Image: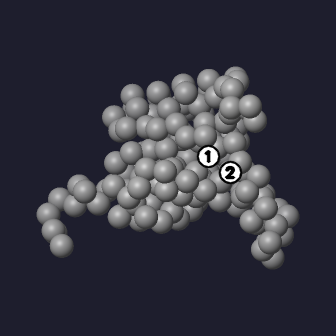
Amino acid sequence: MDSGSGREHRRILALDVGAKRIGVAVSDALGITAQGLETIQRQNKRCDLEALGRVLEKYDIREIVVGLPLRLSGAEGTQSEKMRRFADDLREHFGVTVHLWDERWTSTEANRLLRETDLSIKKRGQAVDRMAAVLILQSWMEAHGAR
């Protein structure tokens, strides 16, 4: 195993961006599994980017996957446009590759999975964003294969 720069083992970050919170997940170094990280409470653009910057640095992120909220028909709406702008801000601020990925069913699936746990309703609500980010990342990695 190469112990050099490790550039080929940089991680992928996924974000489930909402108005109040950003769900965050990171891949393992091989790009096979996704792990949820602490959810970021949104404040303003500067604070949000600072918080994300700390995550990018800590986990040596090579690319970001942002959940793209589409209508059930697959059409884009105002939320999709907000995520496109958010992705552009990430590219410009961090200089990393940013992908947009269909997230239509991730929150529904996250809620379903969490209902099967013993978490209280309050804790479940806090975990949905993180779980949605994990599901976004897992589906993106499955579609693109480990790189």
In percent of the image, x 40 and y 32: which residue is there? 91
Tell me the quarter of the image containing the C terminus: bottom left
Tell me the quarter of the image containing the N terminus: bottom left
> Residue 140: where, in percent of width, then height?
51, 50
Please give left or right for residue 80 compared with residue 64 in the image: right
Please give left or right for residue 87 compared with residue 17 in the image: left
10 or 43: nearer the eye?
A: 10
Pick whichever of labels 1 and 2 is earlier in the sequence.
Answer: 1
Tell how many labels: 2
The kind of residue on which mark 2 rests is: Thr
- Quick one: SS at disc 1? strand
Mark 2 burial class by Cα count in 10 Å: few <14, some 14-19, many 20+: many
In percent of the image, x 78 and y 58: which residue is there? 111
In percent of the image, x 48 and y 66: which residue is there? 33
* Residue topped by disc 1: 16
Q: Tell me the number on the disc at residue 106.
A: 2
Res. 127 image quadrant: bottom right
Callout 1–callout 2 Cβ contact below 8 Å: yes
Res. 38 image quadrant: bottom right
Q: Does residue 75 lie above or below 52 as drawn?
A: above
Mark 1 burial class by Cα count in 10 Å: few <14, some 14-19, many 20+: many
The kind of residue on which mark 1 rests is: Asp
Res. 19 image quadrant: top right
